[in-house]
């Protein structure tokens, strides 16, 4: 499998540099995809280094490397702690996660991730999972649909869109991306129609794959697994994801509550390596327009 056709790694150099890779270290790539970031990590590792790469997608597994230092784990990254325990790993030197949807998913017509193709409303990252976008659209109550579109899609017109979905599904089951686009397009502002439609698809994908709950579990597990001075590098593409990552780095919890001891000290296990976020350069944006909303945050495990 060609990494460049599956997915172009976003902020590749910045992410690898941020991990501060030790040749004999143990590293985890939680989003293998086309293997771009994993390949770059392996190039920095010596013969005693180890890399564990996670992906729940069967298509990604086809690109796994033949390398004695490498282990592919076909699983959702929420189970990182369980799998590391299984492989006898108590702590790791670095963890990477790229939370974006791969170009492979967007460009594979029959997976239903994009409105550019008329395809079944699937959107499952794990093809063995039960919940699909079709089930969400046809079986969720109106208020729940509106909340998903508002929270995960950041759509102000979420209630109007949810009402249209309910009205249409009462006469005919919504089964394809084309049907959904035809129902919603007349309700969208023509000036940003495609952007809003992409947000609808984003919201459905997040719900189908339980992405926010998985991210929450992963961030807490990653904080515990990192050894002192170990690095965490997370690429986000959505404000809700970025807020969760920012909060756990700043306060040690997803909610962003500044919990202190009796002396007023915050003992958050992670510390930001850079102030703010790292974003793609103009050159990268030109070469890979899909990187435009990427934000990279890098943190280091405290030594205390």
Image (spheres, rainbow, N blue to C red):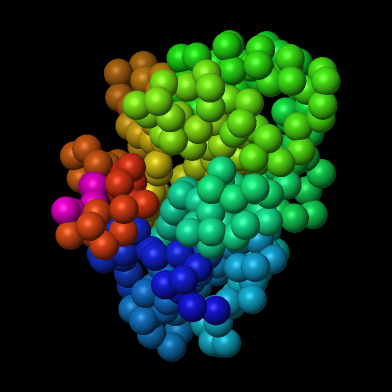
Question: Would residue 1 appear left or right of 265 to someone viewing this image?
Answer: right
The answer to whether residue 38 is visible is no
Could you say which is closer to the camera, residue 15 or residue 142? 142
Question: Would residue 76 appear left or right of 169 to someone viewing this image?
Answer: left
274 versus 201 height, above or below: below
The secondary structure making up most of the magenta span is loop
Instruction: Give the number of callouts.
Output: 0
Q: Position of residue 267 (x, y in %)?
A: 36, 32
89 versus 80 height, above or below: below
The answer to whether residue 121 is visible is yes
Residue depicted at x 83% and y 20%: 171
Q: Position of residue 10 (x, y in %)?
A: 34, 58
Residue depicted at x 81% and y 30%: 173
Q: Position of residue 157 (x, y in %)?
A: 50, 14
Q: Quadrant of the N terminus?
A: bottom right
- Res 265 quadrant in image: top left
**Magenta span of residues:** 278-282
Question: Would residue 190 appear left or right of 12 to someone viewing this image?
Answer: right
Q: Position of residue 214 (x, y in %)?
A: 61, 41
5 versus 173 height, above or below: below
Q: Residue 65: within the magenta? A: no
Could you say which is closer to the camera, residue 231 or residue 241? 241
Question: Would residue 126 appear left or right of 92 to someone viewing this image?
Answer: right
Residue depicted at x 69% and y 66%: 58
């Amino acid at each position: 499998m060609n990494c460049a056709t599956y997915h172009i790694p976003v902020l590749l150099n910045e992410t690898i540099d941020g991990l501060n890779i030790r040749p004999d270290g143990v590293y985890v790539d939680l989003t293998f995809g086309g293997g771009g970031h994993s390949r770059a990590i392996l190039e920095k590792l010596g013969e005693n280094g180890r890399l564990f790469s996670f992906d729940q997608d069967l298509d990604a597994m086809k690109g796994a490397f033949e390398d004695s230092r490498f282990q592919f784990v076909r699983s959702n990254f929420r189970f990182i702690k369980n799998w590391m325990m299984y492989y006898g790993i108590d702590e790791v030197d670095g963890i990477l996660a790229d939370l974006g949807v791969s170009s492979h998913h967007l460009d594979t017509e029959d997976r239903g991730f994009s409105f550019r193709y008329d395809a079944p409303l699937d959107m499952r990252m794990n093809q063995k999972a039960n919940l699909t976008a079709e089930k969400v659209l046809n079986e969720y109550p109106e208020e729940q649909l509106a909340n998903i579109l508002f929270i995960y899609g950041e759509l102000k017109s979420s209630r109007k869109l949810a009402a249209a979905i309910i009205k249409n599904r009462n006469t005919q089951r919504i089964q394809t991306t084309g049907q959904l686009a035809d129902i919603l397009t007349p309700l969208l502002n023509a000036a940003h129609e495609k952007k809003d439609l992409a947000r609808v698809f984003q919201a459905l994908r997040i719900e189908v794959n339980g992405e926010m709950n998985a991210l929450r579990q992963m961030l807490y597990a990653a904080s515990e697994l990192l050894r002192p001075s170990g690095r965490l590098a997370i690429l986000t593409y959505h404000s809700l994801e970025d807020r969760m990552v920012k909060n756990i780095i700043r306060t040690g919890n997803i909610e962003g509550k500044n919990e202190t001891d009796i002396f007023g000290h915050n003992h958050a296990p992670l510390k930001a390596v850079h102030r703010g976020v790292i974003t793609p350069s103009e050159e990268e944006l030109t070469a890979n327009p899909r990187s435009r909303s990427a934000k990279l945050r890098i943190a280091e495990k405290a030594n205390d």
